[in-house]
Image (tube, rainbow, N blue to C red):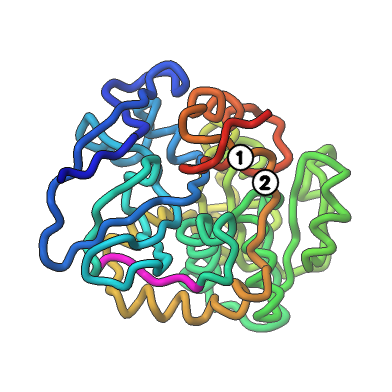
């Protein structure tokens, strides 16, 4: 008997809540080395919204099942039934059943809450790779980031704290300061006053930018000579603004990072090694992020509209089995 799956799919790009479609698809028969997985939870990430609008760095062949991150449970195939798995950067989590290659998934312990496990493949690796791959930071070194209350920003704080790095964290709202300090942030600033004017006496080697525009310029100005500025997001929808003097007189290096590209070139051993190092922080709950609301898959349009709001206090999740919210 054929297996059917309910999917949230994309057939043409546009306004996310207008172009997403709920359809029923038929899955092909399982082949050797494959597994049948029932997705449990998946977040709505900025990358998902960009795929829907056609502005993401890579464009999938349409039609496509959406959702670039999630956790699911194996129900059939070459891995034990009941095993929870991740499949980093495997698009297609917004559905009730999917087929994956067993060699491309990674087991996740059942004791990790599904809501946490569903958000482990993008934000913690993004934070980890930026901290490890651009500058050789040592305990006691300083770094700065904007969008510090984002999912990646919170992971940066947790990993940096564990490694003895000091973080300066820029946010837009004062009420976020105690929350980030409780996570281990060394210094939290708002951008009401130019950030570069608020920081003195610190040799900052690394800046992490997820905003662009004036925010990116301000954190670049705090860097020590030969410092590195890494852009991984553009929440402000504005291009980078660079002072000539940062390049000429201070030799600031401007780089970019895209975790999808890292996964594309990483070996399975690379990925296992990374998650092995992150495992203690995962089990300690250091990567738990606030969740504002969870929607069932059939409410995908409402969920996308909610995820696109500028002011949110947490992530928007999709549950493939949840009842409609009251």
Residue 235 falls in which quadrant of the image?
A: top right
Residue at the front extreme of this rendering: 1
Q: Secondary structure at mark 1?
A: strand
Which is nearer the eye, 157 or 224?
A: 157
Q: Measured along the vertical axis of the image, is residue 248 above or below residue 61? A: below
Residue 55 as seen in the image, left or right of residue 165: left
Q: Nearer the viewer, residue 184 or 238?
A: 184
Which of the 4 image quarters holds residue 72?
A: bottom left
Quadrant holding the C terminus? top right
- Residue nearest the observer in this picture, 132 or 96: 96
Rounded to the nearest angstrom, the CA distance separating label 2 from label 1 is: 8 Å
Is residue 251 shown to the viewer in this render?
no
- Residue located at (34% from left, 28% from top): 54
- Seen in the picture, residue 306 relative to 106 is either above or below; the reply is above
Q: Position of residue 187 (x, y in %)?
A: 82, 61
Q: Which mark is residue 291?
A: 2
Number of the front mark, 2 or 1 = 1
Residue bounds of the magenta highlight:
104-109
Q: Is residue 83 left or right of residue 151?
A: left
Q: Which residue is mark 1?
A: 294
| Residue displayed at 61% across by 58% down | 207
Image side of residue 241 versus residue 219, left or right: left
User: Quarter of the image containing the N terminus?
Assistant: top left
Relative to 324, residue 126 above or below? below
């Amino acid at each position: 008997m054929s297996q059917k799956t309910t999917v949230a799919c994309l057939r043409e790009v546009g306004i996310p809540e207008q172009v997403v479609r709920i359809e029923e698809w038929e899955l092909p028969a399982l082949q050797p080395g494959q597994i049948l997985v029932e997705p449990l939870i998946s977040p709505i990430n900025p990358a998902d919204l960009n795929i829907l609008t056609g502005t993401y760095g890579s464009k999938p062949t349409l039609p496509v099942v959406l959702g670039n991150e999630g956790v699911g449970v194996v129900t059939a195939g070459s891995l034990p039934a009941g095993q929870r798995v991740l499949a980093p950067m495997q698009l297609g989590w917004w559905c009730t059943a999917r087929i994956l290659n067993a060699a491309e998934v990674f087991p996740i312990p059942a004791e990790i809450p599904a809501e946490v496990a569903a958000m482990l493949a993008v934000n913690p690796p993004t934070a980890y790779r930026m901290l490890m791959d651009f500058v050789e930071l040592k305990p006691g070194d300083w770094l700065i980031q904007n969008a510090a209350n984002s999912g990646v920003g919170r992971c940066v704080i947790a990993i940096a704290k564990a490694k003895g790095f000091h973080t300066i964290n820029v946010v837009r709202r004062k009420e976020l300061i105690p929350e980030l300090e409780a996570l281990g942030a060394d210094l939290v600033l708002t951008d009401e006053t130019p950030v570069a004017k608020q920081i003195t006496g610190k040799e900052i080697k690394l800046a992490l930018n997820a905003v662009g525009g004036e925010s990116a310029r301000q954190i670049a100005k705090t860097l020590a000579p030969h410092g590195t500025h890494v852009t991984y997001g553009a929440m402000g929808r504005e291009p980078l603004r660079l002072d000539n003097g940062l390049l000429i007189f201070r030799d600031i290096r401007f780089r970019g990072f895209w975790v999808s590209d890292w996964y594309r070139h990483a070996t399975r051993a690379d990925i296992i090694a990374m998650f092995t190092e992150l495992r203690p922080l995962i089990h300690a709950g250091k990567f738990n992020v606030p969740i504002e609301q969870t929607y069932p898959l059939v409410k995908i349009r409402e969920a996308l509209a909610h995820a696109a709001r500028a002011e949110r206090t947490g992530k928007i999740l999709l549950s493939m089995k949840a009842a409609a919210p009251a």
